[in-house]
Structures are given as structure tokens and as C-alpha cells.
């Protein structure tokens, strides 16, 4: 094979592209990865998953310092935090992730190119480096995994350029910590940042045009999370949309006006109105790859585009836009192309983690979905404030909710709110995917005291309701 020819070329440097290229080389194929930036990791490492979760962990730590008196301790905390101080941990983690990613590419013999990748035809990709030099490479297959960017509605006159209004990618450029913040959009990203900044002592207002936050979740979980937010001092404004953003007379704040005629003045605004795929100037239209109105590439269940040998996965195809799923999709593409692909994954068979404070984790259908399907289901709930380990640690917020099919006893879904929800969901995921019965939780021994004991309590609650 020519030095300029590959079995597969992945455009993008994030989790999906990385895992695809690595999987291909593990199957004896020659793979290349093209990343426009001089560092690997994509949005996941540099302005998305890693920095936001690092900030969440720092915010959690700061909150726990303030609550240390529950352990009989008195710990002084600063009220003059800067964003740079808060991002100290994130910068350390990002640097380490960059090193690990680069080492993985080398260890797995993945060729990496730094530059802009553009598809010239279904078997040819052009790379333009920072100096404008172009080089062309041939390939049998192409994966587009270029990620996404915050959606900026063009017809709403949002003054991003004023230094008072930010999107999630630009959030970390805030120079001074605000005393008040309005978050526009109560989806995953908006809800995460609302709770993170609230725990840092910032007054947060959370707006959404829908009638509840995180509207895709099980309603009971959504409603409970809203209450935890309110308990933390967040003011939630649902069924509201912002009609205008005006710089206040002091020049240091923003006045918001809602569609109900209400006004609110805040120091900073975070716009979290969804994301759009990074598809511009990739040559997609040249080869006939179609995108939707959110600039997300349209694919089939195997992540193939309309062009058979061109695939797409990760955030650039839209939901669920999770790093964990992107990794799976990338590896799946290589297996589908070169042999050994598993069956396509069902969207209800992978966990969704939301890194709010407390966290939310879910797998399987919601209670509302089961009702719509006419399933004869049962429900079991355990509140963490009744769990011994949670009383010891002070993590009493939240619940475990188990949904199961009554005739077959099979566990269908698990929904959790807890500071440790994204870890605790693993047991539920195993039982759901292995089609285990609700009785698994009641008939097996779990360490005591543990947070995971909430599964047993929830299962007993479910079975008790049947009697």
C-alpha cells in the first residue's frame, strides 16, 4: 500500500475518531486521523466533557467544604474565587489527557495529521496545514467525527460580542466571577452549569421554554431535580423564552426581557440552546452527504451516510452526544467496515449521565414511555435519605427508581439522582442489559453500608406494592 493511502481516514481528533482509528489498527488495517488543532482530544478534552466535569468536581469539593459542619468540622472557605482558580484542576487533567491520547495513537500505529481535512471525493481527502500547504491522501473508507459547536440562534440578536453573554464553549473565558448568572436553556449542559455555579455561591436563574427542566427525563426525576435545584437557591423560570438582551446602563450587566413581559438584570448570561454539527467546509455537499437543519449528518443504524463508504459518528450526528457513546460508535464503525460488528446499539441500552449537582443517571425507558407502550409495569423507589451510607456521608439528596415488567419480572429501566449517580448506574445497566429480574436485588447480598443498597430498598418497595 502506498504511503499516502489508507484503509480508513478519520476526520476529527475526539473520542469517536480516536476509537475508530485504534480499532482499525487492532484489526490489522492502516488508519489515519486528521485533527485541525495541534492537540488531540477534540471538544471532549478541551472545552466540553473534561473541563466541565473537572469544574463540577471542584464545585462539589467547594460545596462539601462549606457543609463540613455535618461532620463536626469547621473549615474556612473563600468567597473570592476566580474562574482561573476553579479551572486549576481542569487544566491539569486536560494536559494529562492530551499526553495519554497522543501516546495511544503512537502505541496503536495510527498516523496523525495536523491540519484541515476536506473530502474531495469518496476516496480522497485533502489536508491543509497551518502554513496553507496541501497534501492529498487516498482511502477506502472515511469517517467524519468533527464534533459540534454551541448553537447560536441568528434571529434573536443575542449580543455575544459584548463580553457579558457566553455560550458553553466560551464560558471559560469569563475573566471575573459573576455574582449573578442567567442560564438560557435547561437541557443537559444548561442544567449542569446552573448547579455548578450555584454551589459556588452565584445566584443562578435558569430559563427554559418548556414546562419543565430536562424534559426528556422520567418526569418524576425531572421534578425531583428541579426541587433540589430550588433548594440550592436556583430560580427556575419554565415556560419562558427571552425576547431581548440589553446591556444595562452600568455597562457591566445585562437586562433580560421574557415573552411574559418580565425583566431581570444579571451580571452574565450563558446561552445553552443546543448544539450544531461541525460540517462546514468539509466537502460533504460535494460528495452528496446530507445534513439536517441542525447541521447534523444523517446516518443509518450502522452510522453510514448516503455515501456507502463514508461514515459519521459522535456529536456531529446529534443525540445522544455523549463521549462514552461516541467512543462506542467509533469502534463500531471500524468493526462494521472490517468485520465483526455487533448488532446496532439500542438507544435505551446505554446509560445517560448528567453531571449536575447532584448527578442524574438513567438507563432504559421512562415511566411515561412505558405507559405509552401499554406495558404492565411496576415501580420501586428508595430515597437516599433513608440509606445508612448516605446518612454517614451526607449524600442524602436523591433516589433510585426501578421500573420493571410485572409479567416477566424483567428490569426495564433505572433512574437515579445522587452525587454518585453516574457510578451507581453501572449495576442497573448490567441488570437491564442482561434482562435480569427485579428479584436480583432482593435475593443477593450487597456490602453494607453502601449507597448501592438503595437498589435493594427500591426493589423491596416495588414488590411490596404488589401485595
Image (tube, rainbow, N blue to C red):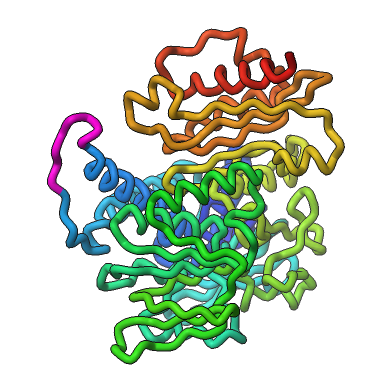
Q: Nearer the viewer, residue 63 or 289?
A: 63
**Farthest residue in the right direction?**
374
Q: Which of 114 and 285 is in front in this view?
A: 285
- Can residue 153 be found in the magenta stretch? no
**Number of numbered discs visible in the structure rendering:** 0
Quadrant in the picture for residue 362: top right
- x, y percent for residue 467: 73, 13
Asked if residue 257 lies left or right of residue 250, the reply is right
Asked if residue 8 lies left or right of residue 231, the reply is right
- x, y percent for residue 412: 72, 30
Q: Give me the residue at 32% from left, 50% from top.
A: 59
Q: Give me the residue at 40% from left, 65% from top.
A: 38
Q: Nearer the viewer, residue 436 or 108?
A: 436
- x, y percent for residue 127: 55, 71
Q: What residue range appears in magenta?
A: 69-76
Magenta-highlighted stretch: main secondary structure?
loop
Q: Which of 330 and 109 is in front in this view?
A: 330
Q: Give me the residue at 62% from left, 16% from top.
A: 460
Is any part of residue 271 visible from this angle?
Answer: yes
Quadrant in the picture for residue 61: top left
Does residue 280 lie above or below 106 as drawn?
Answer: below
Amino acid at each position: 500500500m502506498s504511503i499516502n493511502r489508507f484503509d480508513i481516514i478519520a476526520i476529527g481528533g475526539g473520542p469517536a475518531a480516536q476509537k475508530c482509528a485504534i480499532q482499525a489498527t487492532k484489526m490489522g488495517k492502516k488508519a489515519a486521523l486528521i485533527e485541525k488543532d495541534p492537540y488531540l482530544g477534540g471538544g471532549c478534552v478541551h472545552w466540553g466533557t473534561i473541563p466541565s466535569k473537572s469544574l463540577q468536581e471542584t464545585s462539589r469539593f467547594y460545596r462539601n467544604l462549606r457543609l463540613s459542619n455535618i461532620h463536626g468540622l469547621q473549615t474556612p472557605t473563600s468567597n473570592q474565587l476566580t474562574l482561573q482558580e476553579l479551572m486549576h484542576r481542569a487544566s491539569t487533567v486536560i494536559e494529562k489527557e492530551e499526553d495519554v491520547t497522543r501516546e495511544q495513537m503512537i502505541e496503536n500505529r495510527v498516523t496523525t495529521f495536523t491540519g484541515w481535512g476536506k473530502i474531495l471525493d469518496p476516496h480522497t481527502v485533502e489536508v491543509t496545514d497551518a502554513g496553507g500547504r496541501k497534501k492529498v491522501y487516498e482511502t477506502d473508507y472515511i469517517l467524519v467525527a468533527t464534533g459540534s459547536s454551541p448553537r447560536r440562534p441568528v434571529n434573536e440578536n443575542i449580543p455575544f460580542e459584548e463580553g457579558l453573554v457566553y455560550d458553553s464553549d466560551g464560558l471559560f473565558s469569563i475573566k471575573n466571577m459573576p455574582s449573578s448568572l442567567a442560564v438560557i436553556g435547561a437541557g443537559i449542559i444548561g442544567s449542569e452549569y446552573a448547579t455548578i455555579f450555584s454551589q459556588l455561591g452565584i445566584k443562578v436563574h435558569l430559563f427554559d421554554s418548556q414546562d419543565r427542566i430536562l424534559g426528556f427525563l422520567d418526569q418524576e426525576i425531572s421534578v425531583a431535580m428541579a426541587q433540589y435545584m430550588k433548594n440550592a437557591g436556583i430560580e427556575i423560570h419554565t415556560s419562558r423564552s427571552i425576547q431581548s438582551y440589553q446591556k444595562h446602563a452600568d455597562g457591566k450587566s445585562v437586562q433580560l426581557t421574557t415573552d411574559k413581559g418580565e425583566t431581570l438584570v444579571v451580571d452574565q448570561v450563558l446561552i445553552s440552546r443546543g448544539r450544531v454539527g461541525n460540517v462546514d467546509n468539509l466537502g460533504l455537499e460535494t460528495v452528496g452527504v446530507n445534513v439536517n437543519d441542525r447541521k447534523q449528518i444523517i446516518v443509518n443504524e450502522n452510522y453510514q451516510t448516503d455515501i456507502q463508504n463514508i461514515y459519521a459518528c459522535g456529536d456531529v450526528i446529534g443525540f445522544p452526544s455523549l463521549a462514552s457513546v461516541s467512543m462506542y460508535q467509533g469502534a463500531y464503525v471500524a468493526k462494521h467496515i472490517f468485520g465483526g460488528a455487533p448488532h446496532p446499539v439500542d438507544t435505551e441500552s446505554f446509560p445517560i449521565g448528567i453531571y449536575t449537582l447532584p448527578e442524574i443517571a438513567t438507563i432504559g425507558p421512562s415511566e411515561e414511555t412505558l405507559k405509552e407502550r401499554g406495558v404492565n409495569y411496576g415501580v420501586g423507589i428508595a430515597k437516599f435519605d433513608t440509606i445508612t451510607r448516605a446518612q454517614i456521608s451526607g449524600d442524602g439528596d436523591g433516589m433510585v427508581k426501578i421500573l420493571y415488567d410485572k409479567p416477566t419480572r424483567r428490569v426495564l429501566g433505572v433512574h437515579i439522582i445522587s452525587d454518585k449517580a453516574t457510578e451507581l448506574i453501572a449495576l442497573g445497566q448490567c441488570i437491564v442489559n442482561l434482562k435480569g429480574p427485579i428479584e436480583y436485588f432482593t435475593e443477593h447480598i450487597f456490602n453494607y453500608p453502601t449507597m448501592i443498597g438503595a437498589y435493594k430498598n427500591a426493589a423491596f418497595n416495588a414488590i411490596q406494592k404488589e401485595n
